[in-house]
Image: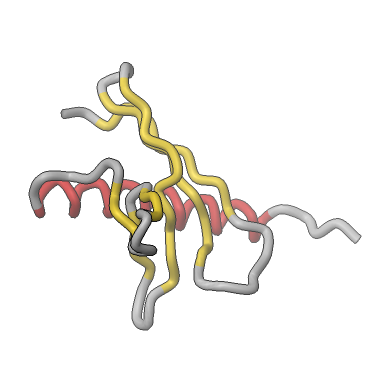
Amino acid sequence: MNITEVRVRLVKKDEGKLKAVATITIDDCFVVHDIKIIKGTDDHFIAMPSKKTSTGEYKDIVHPLNTETRERLRDLILKEFEKAVREAAEQPQEG
């Protein structure tokens, strides 16, 4: 599996723990949208796309099948997130 693109969209509101949403492209032929980047207690982490069940719990609708893949995705996505944050900080503020 080759992650051929990672796009990160920063969340404008700084009200909650959700900091950005990512989209990944796998092998230039499969796209996964709505991977959330969330501020945890110590660091940021990713949450895979999920939906709410009839019992009120959330279930991932796509997810890696092993730790190695999850860590690789996390590392790639958070690297692009940090880059997006740096670039946003370098942009002149409107006002």
| For residue 91, side relative to residue 82 (left or right) | right
In terms of depth relative to the viewer, which is nearer, 87 or 52?
Answer: 52
Total numbered badges shown on the rendered structure:
0
Q: Residue at x 19, y 51 (%)?
A: 70
Residue 7's spot in the image, x, y percent?
47, 38
Q: Position of residue 57 (x, y in %)?
A: 34, 63
Q: Taking 81 as reference, is 8 above or below it? A: above
- Residue 9: x, y in percent? 56, 46
* Residue depicted at 58% across the width and 53% down the height: 10
The residue lying toward the viewer, choosing from 10 and 82, is 10
- Residue furthest to the front in view is 54
From the viewer's perspective, is 64 left or right of 18? left
Measured as percent of width and height from the top left, residue 75 is found at 27, 53
Colouring style: secondary structure
**Extreme bottom residue here?**
41
Q: Residue at x 38, y 68 (%)?
A: 44
- In the picture, which quadrant includes the C terminus? bottom right
Determine whether, in the image, residue 85 is placed left or right of residue 37.
Answer: right
* Residue at (28% x, 27% y) in the render: 26
Quarter of the image that includes the N terminus? top left
The extreme right residue here reads 95
In the picture, residue 37 is in which quadrant?
Answer: bottom left
Question: Height in image: 15 above or below 37?
Answer: below
Residue farthest to the top, as pictured: 29
On the image, which quarter does residue 5 sit in? Answer: top left
Q: Of residues 51 and 65, which is closer to you in this image?
A: 51
Q: Is residue 34 left or right of 61 when viewed as pictured?
A: right
